[in-house]
Image: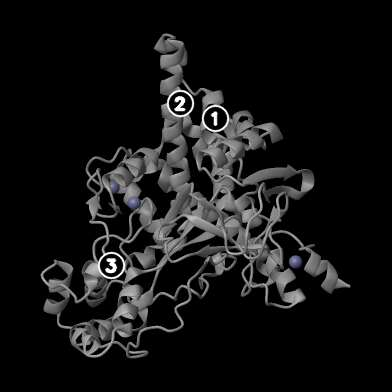
Amino acid sequence: MELICPIDQRCSHQIAALLRPPSPPIVQEYFDQLISKRKCQGIKVKQNGDLGKGVFSETDFEEEQLIFKDEMLVGVQHPSNKIDCLVCSYCFKFIGSIEKQIGRKLYLKTIGIGNSSHNGCQSNSSDDEEDNHYVQNHHSSENGASSSSGSTIPLPMMAVESLMNGELTLPYSNKFPLPSVVSCLGGCEEAFYCSKSCAEADWESSHCLLCTGEKSESCSRKALLKFIQHANETNDIFLLAAKAISFTILRYRKLKASHMSEQEKPASSMLGTDLSILLEAWKPISIGHKRRWWDCIALPDDIDASDEATFRREIQELAFTSLQLLKEAIFDKECELLFSFEIYGHIIGMFELNNLDLVVASPVEDYFLYIDDLLYPEKKEAEKITQPYLDALGEDYSNCCQGTAFFPLQSCMNHSCCPNAKAFKREEDRDGQATIIALRPICNGKEVTISYIDEDLSFEERQALLADYGFRCRCPRCLDEER
Ligand SMILES: [Zn+2]
Ligand SMILES: [Zn+2]
Ligand SMILES: [Zn+2]
């Protein structure tokens, strides 16, 4: 396969301009604005030459205090997880009802979609390419409700359907209300929302180009379906990259429209790509990217070092195929630079190096735990109805929403093997935002750190894992243990 990108050849200067790291004052301004927009007072992103960016406290935090919440720039639910959980495609809150969540999952399982039982929330992704995912902690589910372990007992289809279409109400499910399902504005059957505002926000930020429904603004819905299928079969990191490109194109159009109305120039002088506007639209991505995907991806454990070149070449080919499919689907002449292979490689590389896990705990788990905690005779009465459903769900009953996302502030946080903070979802944190909590008191001016890995591992094991992130840890604990 020849990997020649005509855009790379024709526009090398403009592409170099997009890939040039933004100057420190621009980076600073970006994060200062982001922090004030999100109202996360008490932190500041500081830049420190070779050591890169870090998040610092600007106030005192107590143990277990919330330090900040970080909204994702772009995120996707893992394709296999879509069977387990029906969530808002924009904010990732669970939607519908307890009955709909359970009924839909059993229905999809019964008709044979989603046989590949996905691993639980606490375990890491088993995909080699995703091995360096950092799993966001969420509340432990050790004391799970008692479902018949291992095997599942199927239910008659009628019982499943009556749950899914709302004919049957489960006892106490009104204690776990969920927002009703809002359909996609474009009419696709893939995106669902918790509210009209989420539907509109998603449509405007990226979905109008990536929707496969009737009102899609893509060039070809057929090509788009092919792109999505390829990503689902290979790596969902391509879906994130497509969202990032779509997001940048739409930002470019909005910025250009507002420039035109501001300057009241004749439209003719604004024909063609305006590089300065594209650079502005590209800023959120330009802050994050560093290296091309095929150069920065960690070599999976089961691949011998002697096969490294072949592995990197295959990864590159995969990305090339994905880009050709995406180009057919959503190409935009004015933003053609975004469809260069160089740029695509850097966008995916950014997600590879900062691929933070998106985790939202399931209300279905809470529901069955609630039933389990009821007292006799209420418990017995309720279980008469709920137990067959729990048995049919099996161990998967507690599966949470899982995906990958890019969190701009969290991705600035440096690692420490003795961190003073952690990414942790509290009981009330029920959407896709990242939540950073203090592990111990943090004084004003201190750097806020999290651990990218399991910090209970030995010194050697930690260093080996951190090498995948491209650095050798020199935190106080490592310096101490190295001696
Ligand atoms: Zn929502
Ligand atoms: Zn849609
Ligand atoms: Zn360390």
Residue 413 image point, x, y percent: 65, 54
Q: Quadrant of the C terminus?
A: bottom right
Picture layout, residue 213 above or below residue 312: above
Mark 3: secondary structure? loop
Q: Earlier in the sequence, mark 1 or mark 2?
A: 2
Residue 271 showing in the rendered view: no
Q: CA distance from mark 1 to mark 3?
A: 43 Å
Q: Find disc 2 in the rendering and name its residue.
A: 255
Amino acid type at mark 2: Leu
Pointer 1 residue Cβ closer than 8 Å to ligand 2: no
Q: Find disc 1 in the rendering and name its residue.
A: 280
Nearer the observer, 395 or 317: 395
Quadrant of residue 148 within the rendered picture: bottom left
Q: Is residue 66 left or right of residue 212?
A: right
Q: Find disc 3 in the rendering and name its residue.
A: 176
Amino acid type at mark 1: Glu
